[in-house]
Amino acid sequence: MTLVHKYVEGAPDAPVLLLLHGTGGSPDDLLGLARELAPGAATLAPAGPVSEHGAARWFRRLEEGVFDHEDVVKRAHELADFVVEARTKYGFGDRRLVAVGFSNGANIAAAVALLRPEVVREAALFAAMSPVPDPPSHDLSASRIFLANGEHDPMAPLASTGELIRLLRERGADVVTDRHPGGHQVTVDGVRAAAKWLAP
């Protein structure tokens, strides 16, 4: 699976960060965040392949907050296949890979973590919600997931975020959560908490 993307090599002992932008974003959107989370990390930043009125997304939605779940599953597998190919293409082999996503990018990262845990075992998710209603019961005991969410986020309501946390924990994932009083955003404190979680 080929996606338009940018890859920037990093220090060999640093992780590779898979950067997944939000709706209407681009591969450059999370580069600053990546530098704050893990200075020296390599970055693999694809572009969302779905267009919604010209805005790049990772999967279709039927309306605001209502996902096309079949498309979520299809696109999650496409993204997972892209990551597998990129490991060989760019030679980062068995190096640690951490998905970092915001909003729609966090949702597709969560979907890959649930559907293809052998590809994404670690993810830092900002403003994520549950992407698929009934994921398979994969063993996620080797998975680590960080979630930062706003208590007043109309785009990623806490009830749906709580459902995602339940699905992950039921399957054995190690889940760390960070809540802030704001809305649909990445906060300074959230980034600090994610960086601490990500550090070896």
Image: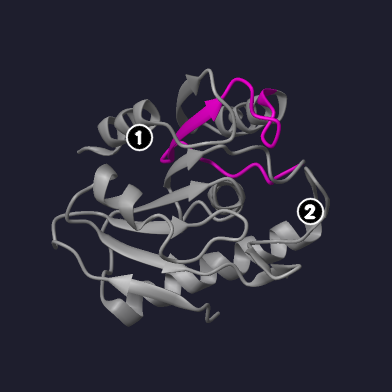
Residue annotated with mark 2 = 69
Left or right, 74 with reference to 191: right
Q: Please tell me whether residue 175 is drawn above or below residue 5 in the rendered image.
A: above
Asked if the residue under mark 2 is in contact with the one under mark 1, i.e. CB atoms within 8 Å, the reply is no
- Amino acid at circle 2: His
Q: Residue at x 55, y 79 (%)?
A: 1
- Is residue 135 part of the magenta span, yes or no? yes
Residue 15 coordinates in the image, percent (x, y): 25, 54
In the image: residue 191, left or right of residue 65: left
At a point 60% along the width and 28% down the height, the residue shown is: 170
**Amino acid type for the residue under numbered disc 1:** Val
The secondary structure type at the circle numbered 1 is helix
Q: Looking at the image, is 130 positioned above or below residue 72? A: above
Residue 134 drawn at (x, y percent): 76, 42
**Which color mode does the image show?**
one colour
Label 1 neighbour load within 10 Å: few <14, some 14-19, many 20+: some
Query: What residue sits right under mark 1 in the picture?
Result: 191
Q: Mark 1 vs mark 2: which is more N-terminal?
A: 2
Above or below residue 97? Residue 198 is above
Q: Secondary structure at mark 2?
A: helix
Residue range of the region highlighted in magenta in the rendering: 134-158
For discs 1 and 2, the disc positioned in front in the rendered view: 1
The answer to whether residue 182 is magenta is no
Magenta segment main secondary structure:
loop
Q: CA distance from mark 1 to mark 2?
A: 29 Å
Residue 149 as seen in the image, left or right of residue 27: right
